[in-house]
Amino acid sequence: MGIELRALALHALDLNQLTKLAKVIGKARSEGASLDPLTPFRLAVLSNSTIDLIVPALVASAARHGVALEVIRPSYDQVAQEALTPDSRMNSSKPDAVLLALDYRALPLKLSLGNREASSSVVQGVLGYLRALRDGIKTHSNAVCIFQTVAPPVEMLFGSLDRALPGTRRSLIDNINRELAEHIPGWGDVLLDVAGLAETVGLADWHDAQQWDMAKFPFSDQLIPLYADHVARTIAGMRGKSAKVLILDLDNTVWGGVIGDDGLEGIRIAQGDTVGEAHLAVQRLALDLRQRGIVLAVASKNTDEVAREPFRTHPEMLLKLEHIAVFQANWNDKATNIQAIAGELSLGLDAMVFLDDNPAERGLVRKLLPQVSVPELPEEPAYYARTLAAAGYFEAVSFAAEDLKRAGFYQDNAKRAILQKTIGGVDAYLASLDMTITFQPFDATGRARIVQLINKSNQYNLTTHRYTDPEVTEAENDPEVFTLQVRLADIFGDNGMISVVISRPCEAGVWEIDTWLMSCRVLGRKVEHMVLREILDHARAAGVHTLTGTYRPTDRNKLVVDHYARLGFTKLQEDSSGLSRWELLVEEAELENTPMKVVSHGFSNRRVHAHD
C-alpha cells in the first residue's frame, strides 16, 4: 500500500488534500495495513505555536519522500517541560527525532541596542537554552534534534541599520542563526533552515500577524505545505533517501535545439543568448551538484557519436565527457536507458533523478519506473535549474570531505563494470583490479563519514541501527567495543570508506555484531569475506570464541537476507517478521581467499599482507 500512498503524495497537494491523505495513512496504520516500502519514522514536535494543521501535512508530505511518519504531539507550549522531564510524554515515546519548531517569540531576545557585549550575552543565553533542551532530550530519549533557524519578524526599529547595530532583534537573530549553524555539526544534530525558507517566500508573506493573534499559528497557513515538505525532505535525508544521481536528457535540456537536426553550430548554449543562458544554468547546476558528490549520467535518444560531439568540441559547453559517469545515447526508450544506468552504477532506481524537457518522456518514466524522481518542468527553460534545485531531491543533513569524491567513485565504478565485461571470469576480473583493502578502528578523522554511512546506508545494512555523532564517539572510545572503518582502492582509484562494523561483547568470549554495513558500489568484489577475516583475526586476539549477528529485515535491505549464511554462520532462530539470529564459531570459520592486499593499522599491532 505504501507505493500507492507515495504515488498520491507526489502530486502538488494543497493543505486540505494533504490532510485527507494523512487520514488515509492513519486509517491504514490503525487497520494494521503494511506501509512498505515506506520507511517508519517517529517524530516528536516541540513548539511554542499551534501545530494542529501542520501535523497532517507532515505525515502526508513524508510519504512523498518515502517515509511512513508518526508524529508525537506533546502539550501546547510545554517545550522545556517535555524536553527536561525524564518521563514526559515525548521522552517516554522514544522518538527517532525531535523537531524543535520554535520561532523568535519562544526565545529570550532582550534588546540591548548598541551594546555589543550585552548582545553577545543574549545570543549565548539563547544557545545555552537550546543546548539545555538538546541535552535533556538526548539524556531521556536519545533522539536526534532537528533545530530550526529563526525567521526574523518583519518589523524594524531603525530600518536597514537593524542588521548592523548590535542588540536589535534582527541582529540578535542573525547571530543566533549563524552560531546555531556552526554548532549543529558538533552536536551531532540536524539543521532545518526555516529562516532561509522564509526569506525565499518573503518575510511579510511568511508571518501572518492576524493568524498569530487569532490562533498562534507560527506562519501563514498558506505556507504549511511548503514547510511540511522541507521537514519531510530533511527526515528523508536522515534516512539516506536523498538521490545520488542526476540523469540528463540532452536536446532542449542541456542545450537548446536538437543536435541531430540543428548540428553543432545550431544548438543554443552561448552566453548572451536568452535560450542559451537558460540551458547553461542547467549545466552549471549539474556541475555544482557533481562537485558536492552527485553522480551525473546522460540518457538521450540519439546516435551516440552525435550526442557526444558537443561535449568534445563545442566551446560554450560547461559539461565535458569526463563529468559524465554513464553515457546512454541510443534509440531505446528512456526507461530502458535509466535501468542500464542504475545497473552500471550498482544503485537502486530510487537514487535516480531524471531531468527531461519532454512531457511524454517524463510520463513514460513515471509510469514504467515509479521509483525514479522526475521533476515536472515548466515550459520556460529559464526556470529549469531553479525547479530542479528547489525540489529537494538532493537534500543533505550532513557533509563529509569524502562526499566531494563520491561522483568520482561511481564514475570509476562504471569503468569497472566495463572492464568486467571484457575479462572472463569473476576471479580473473577481481585479480585485474589490483585491490587494496585498509582496516582501522574508528577515529576522529573518519567520524563524520562513519556517522553518515550509519545513518544513510539502507540496502547492505544488517540491522539498520542508527547512531549519532556522540554515540559513535562513545563506541570509538570504549575499549570493550571493536570498531572497523574499511576503505578500498584499486587500479581505477580510491573508493573511500566502504564499510563500517561495530561489535560489542555480550557475554564472556562472545562478540555481538551490532552493526555491519557496506556501500553497494563494491558489491560482487568479496569485500564482506575480507571484512569477516579481519573481524576474526581481532576476535582470536581478544580471546573471543563465538561471533553472533542479527539480520533485521526492512523494506530495503533484502539484499543481505543471506549475508550470514553465505559467510558460513549457522542460523539460531528466526521469528515471523523475518528477524534472524546467527552464530559463527571463530576457530571453525572457513573463508575463501580473495585477491587483494590487506593493510591493517591503528590497532595494537599493525599488519600488512596479501591474500592470493
Image (cartoon, helix red, strand yellow):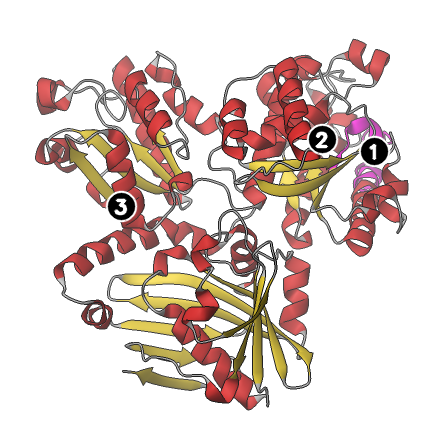
Q: Which residue is mark 2?
A: 150
For disc 1, the marked residue is: 107
Whether residue 365 sits left or right of residue 147 in the image: it is left
Q: Is residue 69 above or below residue 563?
A: above
Residue interval drawn in magenta:
100-123
Q: Earlier in the sequence, mark 3 or mark 1?
A: 1
The quarter of the picture where residue 502 lies is bottom right
Q: Is residue 223 left or right of residue 212?
A: left
Contact flag, marks 2 and 1 (Cβ < 8 Å): yes
**Residue at figure coordinates x 32%, y 17% from the top left:** 359
Q: Give the residue type that dot 1 points to.
A: Leu
CA separation in Å, label 2 and label 3 = 40 Å
Residue 88, located in which quarter of the rendered image?
Answer: top right
| Disc 2 element | loop
What SS does tag 3 mark? loop
Let me know if residue 438 appears in the view. no
- The answer, for residue 521, to whether it is visible in the render is yes
Above or below 267: residue 36? below
The answer to which of 33 and 49 lies nearer the viewer is 33
Relative image position of residue 45 (x, y in whole percent):
76, 35
